[in-house]
Each structure stands twice: as C-alpha cells, then as structure tokens.
Amino acid sequence: MVNSKPDLLQGTLDLLILRTLALQPMHGWGISLRLQQLSDDVLRVNQGSLYPALHRLEVQGWIASEMGTSENNRRARFYRLTAKGRRQLATETENWERMSLAIAKVLQAG
Amino acid sequence: MWHRIFSRLRAFLQRRDLDQELQEELRFHVDMAAQANERSGMPRDVARCRAMRDFGGVLQHAEAVRDQRWLGIDEVRQDLRHAFRTFRRAPVFSVAALLTFAIGIGATTATYSVVYSLLFRPLPLPGAERVVSVMGRSARTGVQYMGLPQDAFTALHTSGAFESVASWDYMGSRLRLAAGTHLEPVEAAEVSADFFAVAGVQPALGRAFRDAECRPGADDVVVLSHEYWQRRFGGSAGVIGRRLEFKEGGRTVIGVMPPGFWYPRVRPIKDPEVLYPSVFNWDKPLASAGAVHFLIARVRSGVSLSAAQAAADVAARRLSALPDDKDLRLSVLPFRQQMGHSWRRILLLLQAAVLLLLLTATANVGNLTLAHMRARRLEFAIRSTLGASPRRVMRQMATEAVTLAVAGGGLGIALAWWLVSVSSHLLPQRLLFAPTVRLDVHVLAVGLALSVAAGLAVALVSAMATISRPPWTGLMEGTPGRQRRSVGFLQSGLVSIQSVLAVVLLAGTGLVLHSLARLHTSTLGFGYPLARFLTVEIDAPTTDGWTRPDWAALVDRGLQVAGRVPGVEAAVSLSPSPLSMEMFGSLEVPSDDGPVRGDLTFAGPGALEALGLRPVGGRLLSDTDAKLHPDAAVVTEGFARRFFSMQNPIGRVLNVRINGKTTARTIVGVVPNVRDRNLIGESPLVMFTPFDAHAASRRRSFLVRVSPDTGDIGRSVAASLKRAGIECQVSPLAATRDVLFASERFYSGVISGFGGIALLLVLVGIAGVVGEAVVRRTREIGVRVAMGARPSQVVRLVLRQVAVPTALGVGFGTLGAIWLTRGLRGVLFEVEPGDPLTFLVVLLVTGTSALVAAWLPARRAARIDPVEALKME
C-alpha cells in the first residue's frame, strides 16, 4: 500500500524527530524544516515517511500531540516529547553514538 | 502496552475526527511549503504546485498514517462487504459452507455442553470437590454395596478424615399428603441430620434436623424445598411449625431450603420436595436392625482423597460387617465421578467422534473453498494486476472464510442451544444442572473458538491456493474452463472419512434405539408382557402394636380380595417382587472359584405360574412344597448352566448359604432366564424357593396379573382393597421398568441426537461437493447436453463422483462400527453390538440419504441450458 523508499537508515528518522522535538514542541512542517536547517540542507525528509513516523512515535507514547494554533494563526497539530520519549531519546542517542563510533573505527582500520 | 491499546482503540472509535485532523495537518504542511516557496521568490501558483509535487500524494500519505493505526479497520469493512457480495454470487458454495459450519459447530458445542454438564461441571454445592460417596465392597466376592450398615457412620466419623458423614437417599421416595379428601403425591428424600453439613447448604428458613430427630419415634419432622414451599404454601413464613398430615404419618415443618438447592443425585430422580430424617436405631444390635443407609460425606479440608480412602480402610476393620459378609471394605469415591458412571467412556468417545466430525467438516469447507477459489482465479488475477498486494488479497479471503465460519458458528450456537434444551427436556429431573448453552460462558467460548479456528483453517487453505501460483497464470487461464474433471482426491477422501464417522455414530444410535425398543417390548423373561403385571404395596395400618403375624394376615387378605377383582387373573405372593429393590435374603453358592452370588426369590403358591414361567425341565413349585418340601428350589437356566453345566440338574442337591446360613436345596425344576432390576448385562442367577416363616412374615407386597385390555384395572384393584379396609399403592411393573431405565433412555436420546446430526453433516458435505462440481462443470455439461446427453445420463455422471468415496466410507465405517460399538455392550439391552438387523437399517438409511443428498444438486446439472452454459465462456 505504501511505496516508501527508506531515505534514512532504519530508525534514524525516529531519533532525529525525537531530537528535534527535544528543543521545543513543533508541528510536522516545522520538524521537517528544522531537520533541513540543522543538517545544513543535507537531510531532506520525505513527507511520506515523516507523518507515519510521527504517528508511530505517538502510538509508542514517546511523543504526544494536540491541535494548536500556528505562528500564522492556522490550526495545526503540535507534537511534543513525553517523559518516556525523553528517556528513549537518551538511549537512542547513546546507541547511535556507539554505532557511529564503531563504524568510524571500521572505516579507519581499512 | 496499555498506551498502545488505548491509542488504537481511540483511533478506531474516533476515526472520522482523526481522519479530518490528519487531512488538515497534511494540508497545513503543503500550505506552509507553498508559502516558503513563495517567499523564496516563486510565483504563487508555481510555489503551490511545487509544494504539492514535493509532498507527493496526500491520500497516499494519509493511508500510510492510517496503516499505523488500527488494523486497517476500513479495509475490513470493505472486505466484509465484498465477502457478502461474493456469497450471493455463489449460493451453492456459501449455503453448503454455512450449513456445514452451523451443524458441525452446533453439534460439537452441544455435545461438549452435555458431556461437560454430565461429567465435569462442578456440582452446584459449596466446596463440592470434597463431597464423596462411600460404598461397600465385599473383599471376598467383589460385590458392591450401595447401602451400608449404620455403624459405618460411627466408624467413618471417628476416623477423623471426614468433616461430616450423612445418610442420603439415592433413589428418592414419595410421600402422600392428605389434602381434604384426596392424597397429593410429594417427592421426598430421606436424609440424616448431617446431610446439610455434607451438602454445605443449610435451610434458609427454620432449621435442619437434629441428631435426636434421627431416632425412632422422634422423626416426625420435615424440611421443605424452596420451590415446594412457594408452590404449595405460597412462600408463607408461617409454615414453620405447621403439621403436615402425610398418609405415611404426620410431620412438623421445621425448615425450608434456599432457592435452587440442588439435591445430590447420581441417577435421574425428581427434585425432592420434602426432606425427612433417616432413622437410626442405635439401641438394637446391628444384625436385627438390618436397615442399610447410603452414605455421603464431606472430606475434611486439607485431607486428600487417598488419605480419606486410607482412613476409610482403617474404619472398615472396625465394622461389625453385614450379616453375611465378614470382609466389607469401604470405598471413597468423589461424588462427581458417580454421575453418568457407566456412560463416561461412551460419552467421551462420542465427544471425540463429534470433534473429529467437525474437523472433517472444516476440511470439507476448506476444500470447497479451494474449488471455489479455482473458479475465482480470474478475479484474483485482475485484482493483483490492478495493484492489490498479495497480503491484501489474502486478507480478503481470510475475511470471507472467517465471516462464513462466524456466521455458521452463530447459527451453530443457536442450534446447540436448541439441542441442549431438547436434551434437558429429555431429562427433566435436573441431573444435568444448568444445562443451557446461553448462560455458560465456558461452552460459548468453546463454540466461538471453534468457529474462529475453523474459519482460520479454511482461510489458510485458500491462502495456500493463491500463493502457490503467480497471479498472471490466472489471467492466462481465463475462465474456469480447463479444470480437472473429477472431484479431487482430497475431496473424495473427506467424503469417505465423513461417511465412516457417520456410519459409526449411526450404528451406535441404531443399537441404542434398538435396545430401547427391545426394552419396551421385552417381557424380561416372564411369560406375559410387563403391562399385565401390577405390584401392590400394602400400607402400614395406623394402629400401633402391629406385629409381623398381623402383617402376614393382612397381605393374605389382600391377596384374596385382589384375586376376586374382575379382570385379575392371579394374585400371588412373590418376594422380592420383580424389579424391586427389596432384599429378602442373600444367596451365595459355594463354587470352585469362591462363592457366587445369586438372586433368592421366595415364591408363594401359583407364583411361578402367574409369572408365566414354564419349566424347561422338572416341575414348578407346588402348593404343598412349603409344607412337604421346604428345600425345593426352581432355578433359571443360567443358574443350572453355571453350577451343573451339561448335567441334568433335576433332583440334584446343592449346598447354598441363605442369609449366611448353609442349607441344602434340591433342584426340582428349571425355568428360562428372567431379569432383575439390573436390566442390562448377564442374566442373574435366580433361585425360586417356597416361603419360609420368616420371609412370609416380612411380606409387604404382592403381585397381580391382569387379563389383557382391561384398561385402568390398577385403580379398581386399589378401590376394592380400600373397600376391604386395606390401604395400598398399586404400580404397574412397566412403570417401574421405565423409572429404572430413565438414565439409559436419556443417554440413548443424546447419542441418537448426535447420530442424526452426524448424518446431516455428511449429507450437507455430499450435497456441497456435488453442487460445487455441478457449478464447476457447467460448461462441460452444457457441451454434453448440446451433444444430446439425456438428463438421466447427466445426473448419473455427477452422482458417480461421490458414489465411490461414499461407498468406500460406508464400507470402512461398517467395519469400524462393528469394532467400536463393542464398547456399548454394557448398556445395550438384549441387543448384541454387532446386531445385523440394526446394521442393515443403518446402511440403508446412510445409503439412501446419501443418494438423495447427491441427487438434489445433481438435478440442477440436468437442467443446465446448453446455450447459457456455453455463453459463460
């Protein structure tokens, strides 16, 4: 049903979303904009992955959402990190660092 | 976890709102992107266009998000709608599948419910698992005694393993309440004071019996059942202390049991309406007290059953024993296990057979589905090509299968409910407590689980059918033209297996029905139909100081009066009277393999002639034997064969133990075998001997034979005796037999019901297979008809498909039935398990109905219009 090409490493998007939301609650558009800015335009998130991912994280209980008013006075859904999500972010960050360190070591060894 | 479930649930419940919000959220994203583009200098419409392109399909994204939610509930709805459309397009398949599920699940649920109620459902008494019955067993002869002497109570009580030990009435009895000028029968049971503690239920109003009320002369009290209290006394609390005048003696009401109290029973008896105290006569030495009691006890909590048995073994050694048996053992049995005892294995077998039947039925539906799928290959091919993922197609099929199964299961549960209420009507005496399917979560769960399991099994079969081939092969094949012509091997095999099961179940049904019919027409070895015998029981006169000689004189007078009633052919003394529970003396014959028990019957003048027994050797007892040859004895053929094998028994002297005393008896005649109250099994070894003085003085009843077609002569006999000042109860022997056989009748009914259902299931299976074949071969048949095939030829062509597997199944089924129905030997009356007549009828019924089941859909084949059939291409 979904023809989604993974544009990021599996699980990375979740980590990035959590990280982005750690700064402040945000709507979907804001998240994709922020990701783009923070990564100096390197990471462009496919919307086809973003919204399902947001929903998945919400079902997991790592983020919560409510309807709010955007900066230009439009109704928008705002996502925020939950306490559980904060813990998850910590674990995933640690995992990521360990993993990228390991990968870096392997690459340098070559 | 909870969070996830909750959010899914919310997603389902608020899906409309959520959808709207989702659309809004995605639109917002696009709008924001468009604004950003605009700010970077694009013209407005280009900016918007670009944003939309970047975003991609809004609907697709929405769908992707929805996918994260509830298990695609929308699709399930869509699948359901599609499923119903498919069912309407293939009515033969759908009806066959639905009926198979309904009957299969209905039968399984109903058997389960009945078997569970009869064998496993905990007794409706508090702490029921600790309620046991205690029976005696002779270590020497192995004979079981339900009744035990009263000192067994003391012995068990002091053993410490039992919380309480009580006497209990396993047969039930009937009192007659004097109401104005007539007598109202009241169902009664005799229990001792501790019975209430054993049952764990105390009267809701008033009190239970005291020990002191279980003594001779102090026992004139009674406890009413709630239902009787409501019905007869309008639930008035003033009933306590009221004196009820029973024909059997006045009694004061001291208590009322709570509503719904279940009187413990091991055989079908009516709910007792009143309980009255058992009487223990502790002053009298045991041997002369003579009375026996049926024991029910409650094991002390924390004491295991084996510990209780061990305690009972020790207690048994302290017993002064039955008069004629020095080696009495006590066996402690969980009360629950006593119920449906002799039928336990048969019921479990029945359950297994029905379960197997459900399995084959499910397989059959699976197989029909397979055929159905083959016909729909084109449809699936198109759907796959149009982009449906394999998962989606499979889900569609699973939905179809489960829908069918659950709809069938629903029907099945309704059927089960009906079947169970029918079977509980067969047995109104509440042996099956709470036998409803509706109220039993347990049974309902089983029914539903069966439906879903069956549905999933079928779905699995169909899934395998679709993944086994790539979709485009379906497109290439086009319409279902190129098909195997014959019914598949698997399908034939299933028809065979179902026929096997049906024949086995039907053979069992046939045998028990035959046995019931036999029982109704059997004379039990007597020379006249049972309908021509009446047992007259004489009531104790109300005057005090009644002695045994007075009794004897009363019975003799009754005999004379009854003998003169028009229509009465004979009135004779016979003790015990046929089929009665009375014990007039025990008989043991010493033999090489230890003593053998026999039935001892004292026969008055003309008694054997009145029974219609004709000597096959020697003579019957004569009127003068009592005086001149008190040691004369007439024995049954079985008795003669057992002790004299091939030799002529006439004139032989046999040493026997009568009431524990060894005496000699001279055989003067041999008569055919007769039955006692154990209607089934080996014929008893019966010895008829003239009354001795002791037995004559203990007579309370006599036997009357009436001429045929005399109408309700029982009433005129009773009336004549009453005019002569003798109060009595007259009961036809046939009624006594019916009471004895009540549980057999019930179980036979249950077995027959399931036999019938098994047959029905197989017939639906056969009809389904044939019907599906007709639909599948429509084109071929059309060609045949166009080429000039006659309708009869077409019908024969289709019938041939199921004829072979059915015949095979019936053949193997017959062999299986001959082997399996041997298990029925213990419950069949005068019918051998392999009875040829029964088997012939069963085979005829199975064969004919299978033919009809196949013929009905086959007729459709004959009516196929060749033009229509060929246009299908």
Image (cartoon, coloured by chain):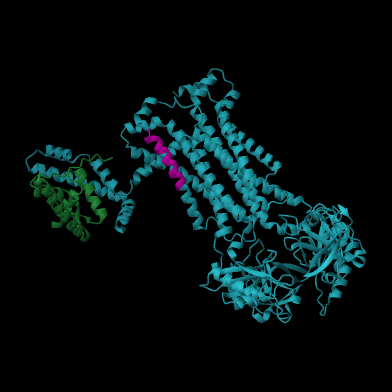
Q: Tell me the residue at 37%/35% (across/down).
A: B467
Q: For the N terminus of chain B, which image quadrant? A: bottom left
Measuring from the top left, give residue B762's x and y in whole percent. 57, 40
Q: For the C terminus of chain B, which image quadrant? A: top left
Q: How many marks?
A: 0
Residue B608 in sight from this viewpoint: yes
Please tell me whether residue B504 belongs to the stretch shown in magenta.
Answer: no
Quadrant housing residue B221: bottom right
Q: Tell me the residue at 70%/44% (across/down).
A: B835
Measuring from the top left, give residue B643's x and y in whole percent. 79, 57
Q: Residue B244 versus residue B392: which sits nearer the camera?
A: B392
Chain identifier of the green chain: A
Measuring from the top left, give residue A9's x and y in whole percent. 18, 45
Q: Is residue B249 left or right of residue B343?
A: right
Q: Is residue B384 left or right of residue B722?
A: left
Outermost residue, front side: B592
Q: Which residues are magenta?
A: B452-468
